[in-house]
């Protein structure tokens, strides 16, 4: 992963962490349930964006190396991994 | 919200926060992208559970009061809110 | 369910069915995979909308009756049902 | 796409179409809303499976060709497409 990508991902993760701390405060202060749910959904959307950035990086690096390489087992493993995280995302 | 529910929700949020900090470390240490994505998905699943607990509490408290009460506008507003968070969840 | 709501829901379901038939044709004609996935996602978004309309109707009818009624078991069962479909939606 | 994969995908799509027709009947016969929502969710899960199969096929065919090929624009376009369907799935 190049430094710019890592930095962008870490900033988004730090922002999601701060957001989550704010949600803990809301629950502690008995905020309106629907407002809490909406804030949780905003954190989840931010995490979706991080996952998409990680996947993009993965396809450009490890996956590209495996597809160009000559180890069919490694290639097969990677193909199945990408489909499995896509499938798992459907279940969230 | 009763104290036991609030405590259970706060514990889950604190656990999700800790998990997210762990993911920041993983990215910093250049962990395998697919592993990072899987950990993000685990945090999202934990947050889904918190949202479901918040919704359950909402239906039992504010929503029940509104449906039994005699303010049709308030009732209408609440009905639309629940459908809107359900709909939003579909988009995550 | 009132007739206008049922009619609107049936129209959306019929439209989703037609869309799905079109996707079968695309696969038969060896369309580009990514285009097929996008069409499937469009059908899923249409079905999400139908689910939200069904939930809205449920909250206004059965759920309202149960919350105003004096059968606590029935009320409890309904509250759990709504939370369970919300939770299940998170897993799609 | 090889014939076995196409056949498997078409069978799943035909099954989802049949399922959807059954849901139209349920709505016509005024079935319980929650039951209708659960059946819609089952169709969406079946469609998720089809999307995952299409993606798996795409990675093994077009994507592999592009990554091994020497057209950087084509490769870039494909990488962005995969990330975009992953991202879109997050929004369903």
Image: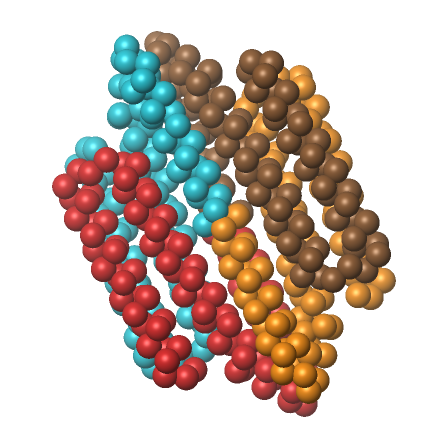
Chain colours: A brown, B orange, C red, D cyan
How many numbered marks does the figure carry? 0
In this view, A13 is above or below B64: above
Q: Position of residue A28 (x, y in %)?
A: 83, 54
Q: Position of residue A52 (x, y in %)?
A: 50, 32
Spot the residue most to the left. C29
Is residue C91 among what the camera can see? no
User: Image quarter for residue D21?
Assistant: bottom left
Observer-nearest of C29 and D87: D87
Q: Position of residue D69 (x, y in %)?
A: 27, 13
In this view, C15 is above or below B90: below
Q: Position of residue B82 (x, y in %)?
A: 59, 66
Observer-nearest of A85 and C67: C67
In this view, C6 is above or below A86: below
Is residue C8 among what the camera can see? yes
Q: Residue at x 73, y 43 (%)?
A: A20
Q: Quadrant of the N terminus of chain D?
A: top left
Q: Residue at x 74, y 38 (%)?
A: A18
């Amino acid at each position: 992963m190049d430094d710019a990508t890592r930095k962008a991902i870490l900033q988004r993760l730090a922002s999601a962490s701060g957001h989550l701390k704010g949600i803990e405060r809301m629950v502690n202060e008995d905020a309106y349930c629907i407002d809490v749910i909406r804030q949780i959904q905003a954190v989840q959307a931010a995490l979706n964006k991080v996952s998409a950035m990680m996947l993009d990086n993965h396809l450009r690096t490890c996956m590209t190396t495996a597809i160009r390489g000559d180890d069919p087992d490694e290639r097969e493993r990677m193909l199945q991994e990408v489909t499995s995280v896509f499938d798992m995302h459907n279940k969230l």
